[in-house]
Image (spheres, grey):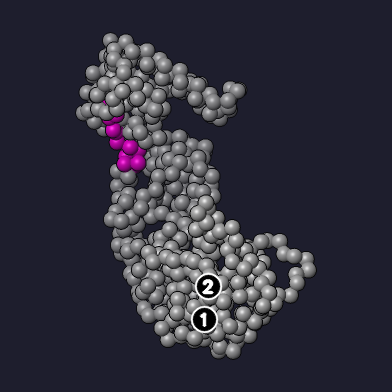
């Protein structure tokens, strides 16, 4: 059997066309669409039970009296049905019967054109025929102008520009899912409105994008209507309408005296874009200015019209004040941090400066991010599965005596430890000191996870015994997770090369005190 590509025949004698008719105006049909209809012996089109077909009305001027017409009438138009297989079962049965009707014509050597509004492969009914017939007959799909393109054209506003991301969403998604995706993208089109409109509008509002959103109804057709989404009466919205978030490039943004700005502190996660939350993506896309330590700023995509302000990692207070001053001038400012902004990062610096009287009325929000501890733990297994403590080994902002006291307290409480900022070029002794201190409370065989550059190009995650922890192998990009007496280190896989580290959620009711000379946990990775 030959692949059915552009007229190359397979097993059957006829030829199948999937004909895209465009968004509604017959003048937007392509020349190839008109040719395909002209070549057809049979013209098929879908319709609701009332029998009226939008696809047929678009192509009506090109239908001939000798065309055999196959009206493929949907048995249901809502999810209410008494079919034993429910709504999906009713549709599957319908598609099978419709495909069989078309196959009978194709087996007779006839050419069949299935009409489709917009583009046949874009949320179209034709694709259900294509999946059932294209492997058996010569097939050609004729693309058409989509409703997305038509809506942008009728609004007269660029839809997507440069490196902006366009997201196409069905309005039938749950409202929370729509909200997350709208918050994360640059531009968007939401289709399949009608009865879904109240939830779609709610998603635009919850994502903070309602003021930008536009509405297009029956683009290029009689009864076309456009407007601001916020002004549309939900009761008036038909199925053939879309909601549009146009391009933000060159879009008017309020600025100047008296215009409220804001600062949003965001976490970029431990590495690149895969670790960004939808909410953070949205905040970064909406910002007029992005402020941060240059290394973290480099993780943020460059957007036209957006100002970027990079600085050294030792000027946190100055960076926070700079961001707040920008916001006082009506700018929307995103301050970026690695990991989570509230974990040894920029949120505290921004909030400390924002607590001054001069910034008392300025909105400041903090958006969470994936922490380095969570990222390293996930790569290793689940070492943070029970109670744990997070401690920074950096003595730049607090004395080592405080760090040592906290290490002793956490270790004696048998907590798993996530140790941030373990070492740097100028700090080479803290890891060794911490190891020796912990060995006073933990077995030498306690598993220690070393997660370096997790999520980045130089990622390395491995596990060693506490007694074997070598300070020379630890730098500022490494995070350490030190297990408790209950943490398990287990080899997996047939070759025993893979290993996981996990801490049980159950804790013994009466744990025996651990002795450094007698291992209280697994001595080595067990099989």
> Residue at the location (52% across, 51% down)?
494
> Residue at the location (36% across, 78% down)?
311
Q: Position of residue 394 (x, y in %)?
A: 51, 83
Query: Residue 460 versus residue 177: which sits nearer the camera?
Result: 460
User: Does the magenta run of residues contain 144?
Assistant: yes
Q: Which residue is mark 2?
A: 480
Q: In the rendered image, which quarter is residue 127 located in?
A: top left
Q: Is residue 33 above or below residue 514?
A: above
**Structural crowding at the residue carrying mark 2, measured as other residues with C-alpha within 10 Å and reported as few (<14), some (14–19) or many (≥20):** many
User: Does the magenta run of residues contain 280?
Assistant: no
Q: Position of residue 495 (x, y in %)?
A: 50, 54
Residue bounds of the magenta highlight: 140-151
Q: Which residue is mark 1?
A: 431
Tell me if residue 473 can be seen.
yes
CB contact under 8 Å: marks 1 and 2: yes
Q: Is residue 431 above or below residue 271?
A: below
> Residue at the location (58% across, 25% down)?
85
> Residue at the location (42% across, 38% down)?
241
Classify the position of the N terminus by image quarter: top left
């Amino acid at each position: 059997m030959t692949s059915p590509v552009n007229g190359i025949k397979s097993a059957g004698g006829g030829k199948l066309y999937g004909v895209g008719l465009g968004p509604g105006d017959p003048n937007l049909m392509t020349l190839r669409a008109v040719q395909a209809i002209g070549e057809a012996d049979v013209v098929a089109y879908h319709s609701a039970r009332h029998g009226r077909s939008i696809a047929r009305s678009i192509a009506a001027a090109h239908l001939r009296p000798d065309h055999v017409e196959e009206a493929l009438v949907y048995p249901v138009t809502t999810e209410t049905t008494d079919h034993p297989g429910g709504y999906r079962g009713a549709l599957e049965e319908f598609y099978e019967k419709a495909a069989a009707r078309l196959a009978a014509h194709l087996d007779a050597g006839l050419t069949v054109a299935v009409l489709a509004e917009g583009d046949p492969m874009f949320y179209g009914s034709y694709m259900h025929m294509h999946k059932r017939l294209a492997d058996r007959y010569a097939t050609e799909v004729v693309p058409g102008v989509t409703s997305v393109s038509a809506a942008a054209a009728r609004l007269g506003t660029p839809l997507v520009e440069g490196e902006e991301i366009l997201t196409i969403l069905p309005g039938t998604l749950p409202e929370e899912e729509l909200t997350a995706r709208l918050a994360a993208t640059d531009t968007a089109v939401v289709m399949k409105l009608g009865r879904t409109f109240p939830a779609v509008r709610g998603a635009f509002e919850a994502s903070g994008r309602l003021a930008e959103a536009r509405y297009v109804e029956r683009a290029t057709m009689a009864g076309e209507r456009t407007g601001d989404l916020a002004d549309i009466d939900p009761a008036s919205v038909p199925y053939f309408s879309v909601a549009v978030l146009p391009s933000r490039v060159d879009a008017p943004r309020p600025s100047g005296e008296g215009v409220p700005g804001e600062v949003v502190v965001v976490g970029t996660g431990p590495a690149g874009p895969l670790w960004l939350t939808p909410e953070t993506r949205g905040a970064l896309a909406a910002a007029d200015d992005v402020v941060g330590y240059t290394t973290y700023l480099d993780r943020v995509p460059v957007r036209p019209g957006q100002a970027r302000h990079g600085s050294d990692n030792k000027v946190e207070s100055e960076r926070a004040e700079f961001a707040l001053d920008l916001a006082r001038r009506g700018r929307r400012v995103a301050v970026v941090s690695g990991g989570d902004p509230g974990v040894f990062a920029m949120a505290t610096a921004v909030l400390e400066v924002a607590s001054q009287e001069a910034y008392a009325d300025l909105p400041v929000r903090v958006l969470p991010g994936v922490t380095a501890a969570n990222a390293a733990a996930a790569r290793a297994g689940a070492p943070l599965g029970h109670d744990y403590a997070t401690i920074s080994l950096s003595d730049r902002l607090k004395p080592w005596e405080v760090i040592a006291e906290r290490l002793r307290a956490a270790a004696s409480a048998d907590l798993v430890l996530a140790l941030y900022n373990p070492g740097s070029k100028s700090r080479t002794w803290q890891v060794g000191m911490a190891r020796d201190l912990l060995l006073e409370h933990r077995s030498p065989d306690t598993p220690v996870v070393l997660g370096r550059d997790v999520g980045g190009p130089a990622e390395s995650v491995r596990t060693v015994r506490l007694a074997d922890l070598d300070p020379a192998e630890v730098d500022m990009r490494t995070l350490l997770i030190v297990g408790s007496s209950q943490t398990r280190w287990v080899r997996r896989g047939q070759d025993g090369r893979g290993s996981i580290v996990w801490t049980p959620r159950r804790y013994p009711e009466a744990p025996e005190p651990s002795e450094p000379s007698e291992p209280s946990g697994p001595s080595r990775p067990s099989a």
